Image (cartoon, rainbow, N blue to C red):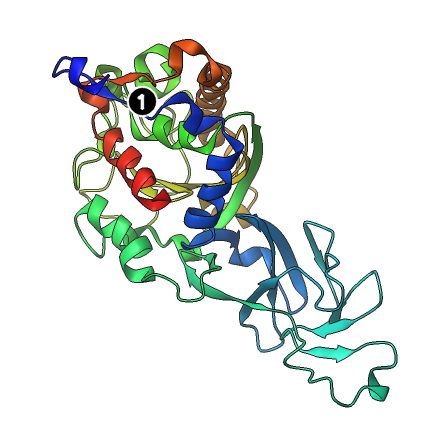
Amino acid sequence: MTSELPPSLLPTLPGSSYTDPQIFAREQERIFEQMWFCAVRADDLERPGSFRTVQVGRESVLVTRSRDDSVKAFLNICRHRGARLCTQEAGEVKRAFQCPYHAWTYGLDGKLVAAPHLTGMPDVDRTTYGLLPVHVREWLGYVWVCLAEEPPSFETDIIGAATERLGDPSAIDRYQVDGLSVGRRIRYEVRANWKLIVENFMECYHCATIHPELTEVLPEFAGGYAAQSYVGHGAEFAGEVQGFTVDGSAGADRIPTVSDEQDRRYFAITMKPQVFVNLVPDHVIVHRMYPLAADHTVVECDWLFLKDVVEAGRDVSRSVELFHRVNVQDFDACERCQPAMDSRAYRTGGVLVPSEHHIGAFHQWVTDRLR
């Protein structure tokens, strides 16, 4: 098909890439279990014993705050007989995690601390039979985990993505993302493949069609401009627009360290494989994808504002509503595409027009990871 295409068009991945369970299993193994994965907001782990469980590839991962206030992560599996240790998505324990099957008990540092008749088994080493640890980093106020034995460079793969997009190593620091507070969180159940969601986020060829509210605020998006195609360039607010809100009204207090060059502009960053960061002068929007099946992806979206704004109970609904509508519009579009991925009409894939050509690099990246 590639040789038959005119120069204006590039081929996409074939339809089976979005529906084949075996391909999805390879993606889980070679992408999500080998790369840094944004798991939870660090503030969600308020005190020692607070925990969240997240699905990373094929593994359930337990992320918790330890007694020394550090964040640790483990495979959420009891070392005795393989029962899932924590069955809740979030919660808090006082001192330890206890398996609901045979009561093997682990400290917040993962060490085996108790089990029925353990004193009669002096040859059982409590560290060796502790929970299996997972690599952890903290950045932008989020906990990132990596299941690989030897994790890739966090500085290159994650921090480098922001530097490359913004063209300035210090640009993202001016948004103080690690010091902001969650003003709203919405969880979306999307019946679509994770790659469709990434592709949608990477292009704006669709913006004039399905995002009327967004193009009112960012008029250059109406022309198909892709926010991530130009290093250091942010989409400028319309002249009459006061803030990044659903009606163009003023938003929350501006983040004081945002530069004049960043004011009244929207920047978007993709951090492969599963994070989107959206930057505007008064808040930051972070999407985290959790691919659960070839046709099922959970997206958790945080709207982050200055702590004073959140603690004072300021009304941020107009800021939230703008991108919530964008999310719903985008995810509806992805769900409309998903059934067609199994159609004979899409067996060899579709095409990318010039304003979407950069998506071809993403497709090549996926293909290379699966080799």
- Quadrant showing the C terminus: top left
Quarter location, residue 156:
bottom left
Residue 173 in view of the camera: no
In the picture as drawn, the residue positioned furthest to the bottom comes out as: 122
User: What kind of residue is marked 1?
Assistant: Val
Picture mark count: 1
Residue 271 lies left or right of residue 66; in this view the side is left
Q: Work out whether 190 lies above or below 69.
A: above
Determine the secondary structure under disc 1.
Answer: helix
92 and 371: which is toward the camera: 371
Looking at the picture, tell me which residue is in the foreground, 215 or 339.
Answer: 339
Placement of the N terminus among the 4 image quadrants: top left
Q: Quadrant of residue 355?
A: top left
> In terms of image quadrants, where is residue 351?
top left
Rendered view: 263 above or below 340: below
What residue is rendered at 48% in x and 31% in y? 320
- Residue 91 placement, left or right of 208: right
Give the class, few, some or many, for how many residues have Cα within 10 Å of label 1's Cα (few <14, many ≥20). Answer: many
Question: Is residue 287 visible in this depiction of the protein?
Answer: yes
Residue pointed to by mark 1 = 217
Q: Position of residue 313 (x, y in %)?
A: 57, 43
Q: Residue at x 74, y 80 (%)?
A: 113
Q: Residue at x 20, y 48 (%)?
A: 164
Residue 33 x %, y %: 47, 53
Q: Position of residue 208 (x, y in %)?
A: 31, 13
Above or below, 156 relative to 310: below
State the residue in front, 141 or 195: 195
